[in-house]
Amino acid sequence: MPRELFGIVVLTVVMVTARPAQTQGQVQTLDPPIPHDSGQNVVPSFEGWYRNADGTYSLSFGYMNRNYKEEPDVQVGPSNRFAPGPEDRGQPTHFMPRRQFGVFAVVVPTEFANDRNNRLTWTLTVHGQTVAIPGSLRPEWEIDALKEATSGNTPPVVKFDPNGPSGQGPLGVTASMKVASPGQATPLVVYATDDGVKKREQIDRRSSAPPLGVAWTKFRGPGAVKFAPDAPKVENGKATTTATFDEPGDYVLRLHAWDDSGRYAGGFQCCWTNGFMKIHVGGTSSQNR
């Protein structure tokens, strides 16, 4: 979501929850929401859209997991679906705690722009609470995910193979691999470079943030995944870690790469890049071996 609109939404929520209530002539104030480690729902978020070079459009989505610790798993289906069309649009089924910006993007064809009323809605039901958020190509939701207008800063370029395809922005790049069985540490290598352009505010305060950072999380999959480490250092354009799976099955791991404007750039939709590694883990459960 553009920063200005995001601020309006947050301000509105604060005003509503903090408004005094009158009961029989007395003023009753409302307590702020109590943080919960678990038991809360997950709220999908439409972050905005941007144009692709081939004439299609990318709709960027994120979410707010209201839990501070719980990481719910919600499989694609009635409780985690897109409409109209296919329910599966590459959305996560594993949800990390708190606010996650621009986690994935859905490509829609050029024709989607012909009708301003076209909507692609993501619906999530977690702990009995259902929230649906529509994505559209309304002009006020256009974002500069691939190049920040004020500074010219662009997202990192990410590859999983030095000679393979690359990606930038929320849509990112996708690769696949196979693992023989659970319980074995599987190397994960990413190649990442950046243009070195700093946002204006980063220049003004002479930021000492690292020029490039990456982090791995579970995006989909039947079992737990352990990374060692989850945020490896990028050295000479390369970062290496390992992932260990405790159950066989099909997984998707998400790589999040950001430049020195920050991991989520204060709510702006530039500049970071997603990478998705699809992994098939064969064999039997490591707990039964």
Image: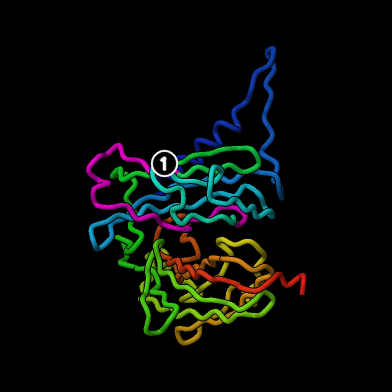
Please give the name of the residue rendered at 56% of the width and 61% of the height, measured from the top-left corner.
220
Q: Is residue 274 visible?
A: yes
Q: Indicate how the structure is coloured in the image.
A: rainbow
Horizontal side of residue 199 vs 75, given as left or right? left
Please give the name of the residue rendered at 58% of the width and 80% of the height, measured from the top-left corner.
241
Amino acid under label 1? Pro
Please give the name of the residue rendered at 22% of the width and 43% of the height, measured from the top-left corner.
114
Rendered view: 133 above or below 269: above
Rendered view: 79 above or below 189: above
Outermost residue on the right side: it is 288
Percent position of residue 38, x then y: 71, 48
Label 1 sits on residue: 134
Rendered view: 9 above or below 144: above
Label 1 sits on a secondary structure element that is strand
Rendered view: 103 above or below 231: above
Please give the name of the residue rendered at 61% of the width and 73% of the height, measured from the top-left corner.
282
Percent position of residue 194, x then y: 39, 76
Magenta segment, which residues? 96-121
Q: Is 100 in the magenta?
A: yes
